[in-house]
Amino acid sequence: MTLTPEILTIYILDGLFLFFATIAFILSIVIIKDWDFNATTKLQYSLEKKSYLTSTIIKYMFYIKLPFFLFFIFTLDNISLILPGAMCGAGVVNSNEYATILMFLKLINLYLFAYWILLDAQDMKQEEQPYLKQKFFIFIGLYILLVLEISLEYSMFSSIDVKDVVDCCGAIFSTNDNTYLSKALSLSPWVLLGVFYMNFAFLILSAIYKHPYIFAILNLFFILISLLSLVAFFGTYIYELPTHHCPFCLLQYEYDYIGYFLYGVLFVGTFNGLVVGFIPFTEIEIIQKYKISLFFNFIYLVTVTLYPVLYYLNNGVLL
Amino acid sequence: MIKLLNVSKIYDKNVIALDDVSLTFQEGELVVLKGVSGSGKSTILSLIGGLVKPTSGEVLVDNKKISKIPDHFVSSFRQKNIGFIFQKYNLISMLSVAENILLPLAPLNLSRLEHKERLAKVLGLFSIEDKRDVVVKNLSGGQQQRVAIARANINSPKIILADEPTANLDEKLSIEFIEILKELKSQNRTIIVATHDPLFFELDFVDRVIEVKNAKIVL
Amino acid sequence: MKLQNIWFVVLACKVNLYILEYSIKYIFRDKYKNIFIVIVMSLLVALLAATLFISNSMKAKYNSIIDNYPDIVITNQKALRDSTIDENEIDKVLTLKGVTSVVARVWGHYYFLNADKKFLILGRDEFETYFNPLLNQKMNINKESMLVSKDVKKILNDNYYKKYFNFIKSDGMIEKVKIQNTLDLDTSVKNPLLIIMNKDLAKNIFQYKNSEVTDLAVSVANKNEIAFIATKIKILFPNARITIKDDLRVHYENIYNLRSGFFLTIFIITFFTFFIIIYDKVSGLNSEQRQEIGILKALGWRVSDVLNAKLYEGSIISLLSYILGISFALIYVYVFNAPYLKDMFLNNYNLLPDFKIAFTMDYETLALLFFLSVPIYIAATIIPSWRVATLEADEVMR
């Protein structure tokens, strides 16, 4: 069990989140149980006040979790220095079974918390507060996910054994083994690129023809194909090494931390795209969301395309 | 139009502030609520302004049941439609006149230009342009009163609620205040003044005088 | 696009500049209380930051020292105690793929009774390359002479050995060695009581027979394979103790982490005490302040507006404290060389007391400090701010 100051910090903040989330959780249950919009009793007024506290807590957690997630990745990278064999976060993630689920869970939670905040904002725009019970129900689910995330995080850090030799990303993301990942990575780049760009084209179409649900689903696909194409194709141009398929190394200093920019932009774009399928927005708001989503996804697309293009212009050949 | 329907308000410790009161105020009316301290007239103002919710009964403003909607929206409603003038001015003494007057606009997040324009208009209306950047605690009572009135008017509210506005003013300033009130009435605002200052009871531009005594309306 | 709009676009969250202005002015209106909070919090942050900065600098220094260690060291053991190894075993090691070179090292300690001091003796061969750059420098050592460090020279001088020294060997015989020259050493080197001499001479003094040497230093081509090759070596030399450079690194990393972990724990306790104090201070509004909230609500500020005002207030204060704390720590550690605190790190480690802490900046440490100060402070203010924001306007104005 290693206890670097970074890990200790993560534990401390996790504890803080757990404490406040539990308060919000208890309040959510109380509110769902007794909320009666039409009542003019003292109880109802106090429930109203409590709902403000809950939404404040959730907002606070989200706005801290966002940069904290980056810090988490930094920490993983940091641990890779003491873990023999690991050269970047990928090795650490691969070194124990909790880590991969944890990564996904953290990402999903970010999307879900952001969704909750947006739902809350919508709810507060209308006097009848139509989504009130719904949003607190959803938070109860979120709370469970949060507790899961924190326990996984604790388990993961406490089971990192510095005596184990782990694979580095070269081994994990190789195209030679018989895993799904390697099969996906060895798909022809043209297929991947084709799907990637076409997905974006469909995004534009579904926005023009105003199909919010299709737009949301296409955004979901876009996340998947973007990550896949990044790891399989575009990443190799960022690293300028045809066998380097690691999604983590992008976050390191040597590559100008481009990973943070790419992932950030992708998150904003796809989040805004996904959300139109789940929250009833007004016409104007949906159009705004289309624009934001397309804009950020486009920036992602352009940035990621630049690398092979520039490489070709500089070197005359492709990898 | 403002309606109070069978409104009762009981505070903690069983203090009955209002007991089954029903009132209607028409648009553009200037009504004086007459009564001694503690009679319940201030409570009526608080109810209309949505600062408190009634223990029973309903308060409707322009057919909106403000006694039933959540605090978040009541505040927005109050912000757009109601201007308060308090007995003790209730200005923030360490801030300047301009800062005090602009406070109600903060939540709206308007442009700075808009702020400037409205401020200028309202400073002019109440003749306090030269005091724009003076810290409020350095002003005289009468000047502070005008700042309070200006603040109440920055949003051009439809309803103005004044709670004992002349209690801290001498006769001269009280008369000045009444002049301002006349001016506001001429803009077709609904004005409700809660006071026990007899100066108000005989005014010709007052539409009604309602007496409030022991938590009830005296008919 | 206005700055606010961009923020809104990214995450449905608008920073209301007017409320922010109000918060800033509010902070200045309550100067003394806020200055007190900022000072205390900055000092806490500074303390923690200083600990981490010192620890980081030492880690960096130590890492650079370790860089000069061999990739793998093979030390023979008999009855699980360190013993000498036969030079000829080098051939066995060279058969392993990935090993670029093996050097038979001769080194050890000599105890000088009169001065009650231990000297470190490094044996050197003109034609060998070593990991330690000190030994790779061009130096002409006479077969009967030695080079000594300044401190050794001083000790010898004090004991009347001016031009030579008599080593007493284990068989009682004396080996007289001339002092050829004094070494110029980097003052932060681990062991300043250093003597460098010809390898054979060292062997003589230690009374190594024939092809006995102290240990074998192995160099590996691909640094990622060190662990792997080490396991192979273990199979070849089942009785030996194999030390890997990375292990050393990890070992010291852990020690420094433990140290800073210790301080961190103390810090946390202090901070939670502070948490409670802040909570208390923020909750305790006097009647004038409560009235102000009532006024704001009467003017149409919603609960969320008042809450935001309070949260902006907390954010500004904690951010300011964070920045100040870091600044204090930077000055304390890198300008004044961290008096008092430094000694708490140094007691067990053989670095000299007048070690100058080198400047290393680690963004992760800054982020860590941020997460330990700002979110915690804001968390302490959430419930009090909410209580304040949900005060009934009517109550406070009566």
Image (spheres, rainbow, N blue to C red):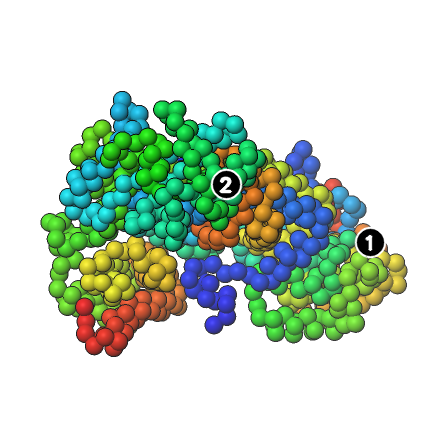
Q: Is residue A206 left or right of residue C48?
A: left
Q: Residues within 10 Å of mark 1 (few under 14, many from 20)?
A: some
Q: Position of residue A67 (x, y in %)?
A: 43, 52
> At 61% from the left edge and 74% from the top edge, which residue is drawn?
B113
Residue extending furthest toward the left: A178
Cα separation between marks 1 and 2: 104 Å
Which residue occupies the extreme top position in the image?
C79
Q: Nearer the viewer, residue C38 or B142?
A: C38
- Position in image of residue A44 (x %, y %): 51, 41
Q: Secondary structure at mark 2?
A: loop
- Which chain does tag 1 point to? B
- The residue shown at (77%, 53%) is B88
Amino acid bearing label 2: Lys
Image quadrant where one finds the N terminus of chain B: bottom right
Are dots 1 and 2 on a single chain?
no
Amino acid type of the residue that numbered disc 1 sits on in the rendered structure: Ala
- Binning the other alpha carbons within 10 Å of mark 2 as few (below 14), some (14 to 19) or many (20 upward) gives few
Q: Chain of mark 2?
A: C
Which residue lies under the disc numbered 1? B167
Q: Which residue is found at the position 68% from the left and 38% from the top?
A: B16
Q: Residue at x 47, y 35 (%)?
A: C165
Q: State which quadrant residue A161 falls in.
A: top left
The answer to whether A2 appears left or right of C153 in the picture is left
- As helix, strand or loop, the secondary structure at mark 1 comes to loop
**Which residue was labeled with disc 2?**
C163
> Can residue C3 be seen here?
yes
- Left or right of C25 on screen, residue C307: left
